[in-house]
Image (cartoon, helix red, strand yellow):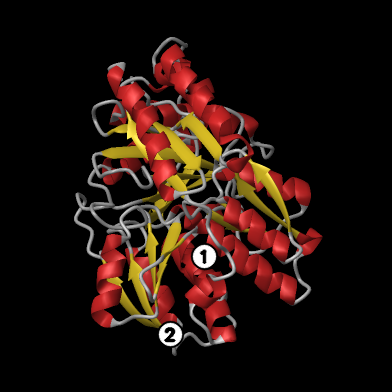
Amino acid sequence: MGNTFGVSGLRGQANVSLTADIVYRFARYLGNRMVGQSSKPGVKPRVVIGKDTRISSDMFESALSSGLAASGCDVFLLGICTTPSVSYITRTCSFDCGVMVTASHNPYHDNGIKVISSNGEPMGDGIFAKSRAYVEGSEPELPYAESSSIGRICDYPEGREKYIRHLVDIPKNPLGGIRIGLDCANGASYAIAHEVFDSLGADVTFINDSPNGLNINSGCGSEHLEAIRAIMKEKKLDVGFSLDGDADRCMAVDRNGNEVNGDNFSFIYAKYLKDKGMLPNNVVVGTVISNLGLRNALQAEGIDYIETTVGEPTVRKCMVEHGAVIGGEQCGHMVFSQDSTTGDGILTALRMLDIMAEKKVGIDVLAAPLHRVPQEYVFVRITDKRAVVADEDVKAVVSRISEELGQSGRLIFRYSDTENLVRIMVEASTEKQCKAYVDEIIGVIRSKGY
């Protein structure tokens, strides 16, 4: 079954490591669990489902719906929508849980399942690991709902409309004077983004908003900023935003073609609130990957910075612990806790645009006080991610480089929870030195045949 069962969801290549049967059996497990945990006897649990634009998403939506209804849950279908929209609707419309069919920023041939608890956050009690024995057939069959206990399946477009109204209410300043580019990654945001920005009267040039099931994230979106840079140069736009396939990430490009990432968003929003005396507990949450420049810029503004491990769930947990209203990752997963319980790419763009409109300056001006320390951050696809990080030769080169960097730089080396790859981040005094160290680690990994 490969890497299907992850920490935060099911994910794999559609009909290879992740099949409709796996998804159906997972839904049977989830449905029985929801029925068993219901505090209202005789009342069926309510589950809302969304999906992205991958060719396999319809298939997995059907498998989920069937498994949940067969177990006694009523199922409500949002259709094509974003992960944050499922989170928002689950939380605000009294659903027992939400499910999103997506592999986020992965290519079209992958897909996955995310489960969201009633409070709008990823279900965090190890449900995917717990379900594995049943899904693989090593536990007894679970009971089916019978007679009137069988669940119903219905379309739920009103949920999607409620989420759109929520986004439209975010900006407090007219956006009409800003020329905006938006890359929808041929993903889940394409229709929602049009409705939101049209309602706001914004001047937006959309790109990659024609999904065909195969082109999601293909040379576009938050991991391919060259697409938004090209249209900005051609149209002479003021700012460009790029979303990923399920729109829980957002990256930006300023009018000069420079990348504006999650570190910049955190600084811009925190400084904006600080200047208004509205930054609770005077704190921002980031991760070990966040550039040292973010810490320096926040310190200069008198704002405290709390560092946590990589991953939106850990950022969100840390925010709750410290009463923070802004936290995020360099890759564009941003949590604005006054508006959402999860990363939301469209919301992130709207928050930045609202500040630009109020201040009447470009995002380059807002981001200018943050001076990035030279940093090289790469993903390396390998054959066995756990074996790589445990390899003695790899550990030796990582240890030596960390010692050489000392207090003048940093090295982060870890594997991905969701893909068979390792992440390498080096901060040093020069870009050349960063690259040299990263290349050295990659060289050892390749020499060992990984």
Provide the secondary structure element on which disc 2 rests: loop
At horizontal 28% and vertical 46% (from top left) the residue drawn is: 58
Amino acid type at image mark 1: Thr
Q: Classify 381 as above or below 432.
A: above
Label 2 crowd bin: few (<14), some (14–19), many (20+), radius 10 Å: some
Give the image quarter of residue 42: top right
**Relative to residue 130, is residue 183 drawn left or right?**
left
Q: Is residue 111 above or below residue 421?
A: below
The answer to whether residue 129 is seen in the rendering is: yes
**Which residue carries the number 2 mark?**
178
Q: Is residue 43 left or right of residue 416?
A: right
- How far, Cα to Cα, is label 1 from label 2? 16 Å
> Element type at marker 1?
helix
Res 351 seen here: no
Residue 152: image quadrant is top left
Q: Which mark is residue 415?
A: none
Q: Return the residue at label 1.
A: 348
Amino acid type shown at disc 2 = Ile
Which quarter of the image is occupied by the N terminus? top left
Which residue occupies 48% across, 18% down? 396
The quarter of the picture where the C terminus appears is top left
**N-terminal of the two: label 1 or label 2?**
2
x then y, percent, for residue 448:
31, 16
- Mark 1, residues whose alpha carbon is within 10 Å: few (<14), some, or many (≥20)? many
x then y, percent, for residue 360: 54, 87
